[in-house]
Image (tube, rainbow, N blue to C red):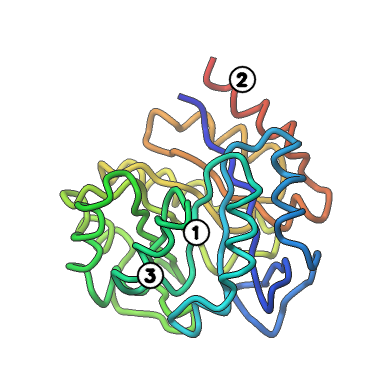
Amino acid sequence: MSLIVFPAIDLKNGQVVRLAEGDMDRATIYGDDPAAQAMLFAEAGAQHLHVVDLDGAFAGESVNGEAVRAIVERFPGHVQLGGGIRNRASVEHWFDLGVSRVVIGTAALEDPEFVRAAARDFPGGVVVAVDARDGMVATKGWADVSTTSVVDLARRFEDAGVASLLFTDVGRDGLLKGCNVEATVDLARSVSIPVIASGGVKGIAEIHVLALHVRDGVEGVITGRALYDGRLDLSAALEVARAAAE
């Protein structure tokens, strides 16, 4: 298996943006046509896409639904969606729309039984986001920090049938400081659930290193700002991921 590279599309007010450290007041706008951006990623070879409804993450419900719908209709691969998915109706709505996987963060901490039920009823479709500030779980669009450690939260779902864990070091997200590879690999080795790396990817070197840890349980990596700023070429990243698996 090769590392899955997920180009990211973060949505705020219907636009493609990237935040710095999850701060809505520190947003950089990269475009106003999310579906067109999704197609650019597809043309570069992407078969997976990571989409986040940032407004939804704070509101606790879908806000950028029309933009998500447009992306799903046009992108020919798999769309993974997060942001404000906190009840059964939301989960069913997105799967009915054609989303491949939903990412659940805040509800994983506050309502774990809901997550367990969703993972059971939609096999392979539920990803649990374990977002960290200094090793502790951050929720509600990263605005709140809990007293639960990332590893403790992850282990609660080991027998639940979740597809993957999405690990983000919030302090690095959108800053191009470099992905926290060490913490990602440590988490992957600590649990039996595959882990997706996120937060701060700045170049091709991190893609290569993470790709070497697929056997440790690292399933994929999400990258956003590095792509938009031209620091990372998506086609090259996909090729590095494939080559490392050979």
Q: Is residue 55 above or below residue 76?
A: below
Report, in whole angstroms, how far the alpha carbon at label 2 lies from the one at label 1: 27 Å
Under mark 1, the amino acid is Leu
Q: Quadrant of residue 47?
A: top right
Determine whether, in the image, residue 79 is placed left or right of residue 191: right
Asked whether the residues under the numbered discs 1 and 3 touch, taking CB atoms below 8 Å apart as contact, a structural biologist would say no
Q: Can you name the residue that lies furthest to the right here?
A: 230
Closer to the chain start, of discs 3 and 2, is 3
Q: Quadrant of residue 194?
A: top left
* Residue shown at the point (53%, 49%) measured from the top left: 79
The residue indicated by pointer 2 is 243
Q: Nearer the viewer, residue 146 or 128?
A: 128
The location of residue 204, given as percent across then percent down, is: 70, 38
Number of marks present in the image shown:
3
Callout 2 crowding tier (Cα within 10 Å): few <14, some 14–19, many ≥20:
some
Determine whether, in the image, residue 47 is placed left or right of residue 92: right
The residue indicated by pointer 1 is 81
Q: Which mark is residue 90?
A: 3
